[in-house]
Amino acid sequence: MIFLYAFLIGGAICVVGQLLMDVFKLTPAHVVASFVVIGAVLDVFGIYDRLIAFAGAGATVPITSFGHSILHGAMAEGHEHGYLGIAIGIFKLTSAGITSAILFGFLIALFFRPKG
Amino acid sequence: MSLLRRQTWRFDRPVYLASTGTTVGPLEARGPLSGNFDKEYASLDCGEKSWPEAEKALMRRAVAFCLAKAGKKEGDMDLFLAGDLMDQTVTSNFIARENRIPFLGLFGACSTSMETLAAGAQLVDSGYAENVLCAVSSHNATAERQFRYPTEYGGPTKLTQTFTVTGAGATIVTREPGKVRVTEATIGRVIDWGIKDASNMGSAMAPAAADTIWTHFQDTGRKPEDYDLIVTGDLSSVGSPILKQLLIEKGLDITKVHQDCGLMIYSPDQPVNAGGSGCACSAVVTYGYLYKRLAEGSLRRVLVVATGALLNSATPKQKDTIPCIAHGVVLESVKEDGR
Amino acid sequence: MLNDPKNYSESIKPFQPEVPYLMNCVKAFLVGGLISLIGQLIQTFYVHFFHFSNQEAGNPTVATLILIASLLTGFGIYDKIARVAGAGSIVPVTGFANSITSAALEHKNEGIVLGIATNLFSLAGEVIVFGVVSAAVLGMIRLFIEQIF
């Protein structure tokens, strides 16, 4: 069942993005930025965690999960070390994503040519 | 030369096109005008190692074809007028570095094709030059990077968006009799009717094209029937109907003779959204297809109105509207003249 | 009346092509859903064969998707998928990888340091900026509220 929910929720989040672009004329950059912020906001009330429990990758693959994980990591350290902990924890859970994106992006750029 | 009212130059002493040279990329080579160009590259990189190098190769080859067909050398040219869409028109600058012809770089965005031709014809007519080489180029990948996103970025395209033509066109303007004459040029004014959407150039540029065409008919006293063809540069499937409607409202109906280079160069099933655009769009259609038909006499008089959007990639983000321009040049078949 | 510069933006509306809202949404849904489904398959794979917990499997899953998206960008395939998919290929984390790799590739001819490295985040930087800023602000508010109660 998790596979079906992942498909449905992941697709639904993209539909929201498509509507933001088509109806509200947002650029892709604005859509992505809004989704990161929305993901962080939804984490405040634990809503995003429930969505992940329900839809798995359907909630962790869209970029909204980046906002969610970044706040999650910040709060985990924040509870231990107070306000300073937020700065310590911000990249804690997103480190793998950012590191792999930089690493693979750099390597691909080294060895490939743009095709046009 | 005589000045008709304010914006139209009439070249009283005959000014001719000695020859033309055109190069295009792979998508244009698969379009309906294939076979009208001197070199049709099979790959977008034109065998070069980067996009800017590919664009240089396009212009270099177009100029070489043009010179060879006229039986002339770089040293025979008194002036090189060229432009393109890159920052500081570097493609033209670098080609001018190679050919060492006295050089004036011009920029009118996609209207540069007719801007260089009009200026070249004027200089030949006024006697300041005997032979002027005019060239423009554009490359889809360099323009994407300049004005939009990296070529491999998966951004969505809009239906109103145009597709930059990969290619280059060159011609030699001379006093020596040839098969095609340049008879008039109408220099456009910058028109801005408040369009902000950089992915809707057809709508933004239509009023500029309408202004230049309307002025041309006012200045020359001609009627649309006096032309076999009135072609606009890159108004696309969105801007062309707007242009026709703008002129019909003013009592000028060009519907029967109007075509758009951006719609001529690609077939409707090619993935180019609203049509082709770029300096090379009007240049390769004019110097490739139209020149051929004028030379053989199957077209007698053509008005080419190249349209340009004078923005850079930052101005739409700064919430500014898009200033647009259009320059018109009249080309006539000499066969008809001699009859 | 089109010949009215002040109302031009309004009066050209009948001349604009209609945006296929429904079709765009269907395509975005299918592609976005498919990418998520692939993500779920990868995650399940990590859970079953490497004995990660569901939560621990999230990181390697995202990294794998990013690798796939970077490779597809290098081969010139991702932008072709995106032409159809619209938001379906922008919203998933694969779009983040594509924006990084495509920017780096594009500037390759300016050198490894000034081209690739300095342009790596020219498009994707906003994700990091908005993630950090929103998380910092929301985190501080939440800590403040928690300390009061």
Image: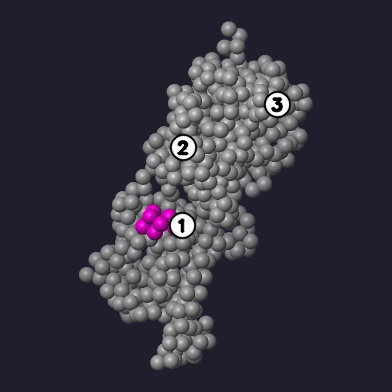
Q: Secondary structure at mark 3?
A: helix
Q: Are marks 2 and 1 on the same chain?
A: no
In the picture, residue C64 is in which quadrant?
A: bottom left
Residue at point 42%, 89% (across, down) = C146
Visible residue check, residue A83: yes
Query: What quarter of the picture does the N terminus of chain C occupy?
Result: top left
Q: Which residues are magenta?
A: A19-26
Say what amino acid the circle numbered 2 marks: Leu
Say whether residue C114 is magenta: no
Visible residue check, residue B33: no
Residue at point 52%, 49% (across, down) = B196
In the rendered view, tell whether residue B60 sits above or below residue B230: below
Residue at point 50%, 32% (across, down) = B261
Marks counted in the figure total 3
Say whether residue A23 is magenta: yes
The x, y position of residue B67, in whole percent, is 66, 27
Say what amino acid the circle numbered 1 marks: Thr
Residue at point 34%, 80% (across, down) = A46
Q: Which mark is residue A27?
A: 1
Residue under label 3: B122
Say what amino acid the circle numbered 3 marks: Gln
Question: Mark 1 Cα within 10 Å, few/some/many (few <14, many 20+)?
Answer: some
